[in-house]
Image: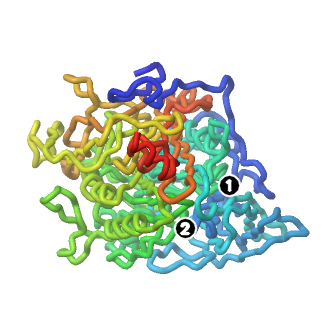
Amino acid sequence: MDDSGLNSWGPAEGPATGLTRRHFLSSVVVVGAAVGLASAAEGAFASSPALASSPPSGPPTTTVPLPTTTAPEQLWLTWGHDPARDVTVGWLSPGSVPQPAPALTYSAAPITTSNPGRTVQLPAPRPLDVTRRYPQASSVSFADGLNAQTTYFYHVELRDLEPGTTYYYQVSDGATPTPSTAGSSFTTAPSGRAKFRFSSYGDLATPSYDLNASGNQWHESCDNSYYAVGAIENPGDGNGPPLFHLLNGDLCYANLDYQNAPSVWRDFGINCARSAANRPWMPALGNHETEFGTCNHAGQPGDAPGGIAAQAAAGNYWNGPYGYGHYLSRFLLPDNGVTNWDGNRLRGNFYEFQVGTVKFISLDADDVIYQDGASAYLNSAANAAPESTSAGAEIPNGTVTYNRLYTGDLTVDPADFSAVPDFSSGTPNLQCLWLERTLREARQDPTVDMIVVFMHQCAMSTSVAGNGSDLGIRQAWLPLFDRYEVDLVLSGHEHDYERTYPVRGYDADYLGAVFSPNPNQTLNEAVSTRRPHVVTTEPTTYEGLSAWDTQEGTVFLVLGGGGTDGPANVYGTDAATGLPQAKVFTERNMISGSEATGFTRNSADSHEDAPWSAATNTGDAYGYAIFDVDPGSRQGQTTITFKYFAIPAVSDETGPLHTGTTTLPTTPTETFVFGRGLSRLGRQHGQDERQLEETRSV
């Protein structure tokens, strides 16, 4: 471990490790509103001054009112089916009043009086309904199940655009006599083999009260969230912002502020719009996107006797489909074409898109993980009263949201301890079937060189303060990642940074040990964790940089340091050897107790030695990743240069309100190149066959 706090495990040392010391700007970087906005409405992008006259003591304990204005805000871009030609523009009304006549205008030139552009009028809002297809222009309303506040979301799918082209857009509420507008510009993805960059992190949360638009403090609020968004618009290497950003789940933790989920989402959206209005931000679902409400699991209104107050006790405690109502209303993401067994279309729950020579796949790991870590009311006190909300809903003690297998069943194959869709049940897991088909088609597609998966929970993590690793992901998805040679897997969940060595297959003879037994386990019992097998601990080199051959094994990156107030960068080590050690969920963590005695929930049950852990960062929990894609000149030559920038915690992060300033770094803490076939014959990527033959003959 050097004084940067970045730990690198294994024999590699010196320049080959790819580790550098951090260098920071000498002054505080404060990122303001996005530049070049067309007629931006006040507050649509930049955080307004805090509304609180004095620092709050903590999050509000009652429901706070939403604005009644209609000026467009929270602009958010996402890719459509083909990022070179399809972009979806989304925005919201600030609060509980729909926009009178919402519209979007766009053009390949700045929108002016002489160039009015093309205008799309949106229909009247309809309640979220995932059983039907959405039109190209849609207005969606969603009523929060716990506080009954209704918010309004607007989406326009722009199709048949020109690749690699900048477009200007403006959205309007259509109010009379003077409408309010907001706008920006975006650039479509290039077509064919082209260079581009993207960025990633997860677990963003919201800024603290001083940088929140509402002036409120929420659970998990931290001012690092504000700086993280600014960092995407101005990466520290000075090479410009990315084409798009990957947001690896746990977006804003609105489920923790159950009285005020719509307000938390609003502060999150206003903060992110400083970047998401200018480039697509592509999210993945995390456990904190699962929220309490009064619907059944499929998202239909609960009908238990006793009205709203009785719904949760009857099992109707989901906020929209699977608890994802706010997420599915806010984001209109690429359509996976899958309809769930309950009749819901699963558009946006998981999806894929391709930019250049890279296939990107977003997954919902809540469907396969063992850990029970989503919305929960678990009070250890005896006879604890239900959580009551402003709308009259009551959540009894012991209520949890657990989405494992919500797209269908899995069964364990004893041959390799993997989990595969269970056709014998009549409802095999649809996400896993879709994933295998998508990976197979990607590897058969000559235009795809590399595959990047992003999701929330971790297959591998040595975090002690965080959750740890999950056997469910290892069983259901790692065999597919191995079979189709996925190159990179990005996650969040742990509020820290960690990188693995390339892994392929698993250590079949290795057993971990139970250290926190569930009722059906015993202390120190041997247990299979399906530990991923390390291919190599020695990088090769490419153009003077350390490099990993992802054809030999998949590299996993934990990028969970977006901005939440709970750093988790304390990592496990074996006390006897000093080598990395990881917690592992090998089954659902047991919830024990009763309303009469109170409830408790177990953590991860087992641990394993973790030779797969290559690098961690004990110095800084926060940070972001930049990826530069170079397709080379022909098929199979794509490389991805990865830079990780660790961001110091804001100056009063350890204080009760997690406020302050920080300095954005200009030097990455890690730089590596990922590519396929980089280690073969020790060749330099890009040599032609004649050069390779000459190398062989020497």
Residue beneath disc 1: 278
Residue 556 position by quadrant: top left
**Towards the viewer: 210 or 114:** 114
The three-letter amino acid code for the residue at tag 1 is Asn
Q: Residue at x 60, y 66 (%)?
A: 153
Residue 648 has which mark? none
The numbered mark at residue 332 is 2
Nearer-the-camera pick, 8 or 368: 8
Q: Quadrant of residue 369?
A: bottom left
Instruction: Compare residues 487 and 266 and report the one nearer the observer.
Output: 487
User: Foreground: 295 or 192?
Assistant: 192
Q: Residue furthest top?
A: 3
Q: At x 12% / y 59%, what residue is drawn?
A: 414
- Write the residue at 58% across / 30% down: 667
Q: Is residue 18 left or right of residue 597?
A: right
* N-terminal label among 1 and 2: 1
Residue that lies at the very extreme toward the right in this rendered image: 114
The x, y position of residue 112, in whole percent, is: 87, 65
- The alpha-carbon separation of the residues under discs 1 and 2 comes to 17 Å
Q: Secondary structure at mark 1?
A: loop
Disc 1 crowd, CA 10 A, few/some/many (<14, 14-19, 20+) = many
| Render colour scheme | rainbow
- Image-based side of 430 in relation to 352, left or right: left
Quadrant (top left/top right/bottom left/bottom right) for the N terminus: top left
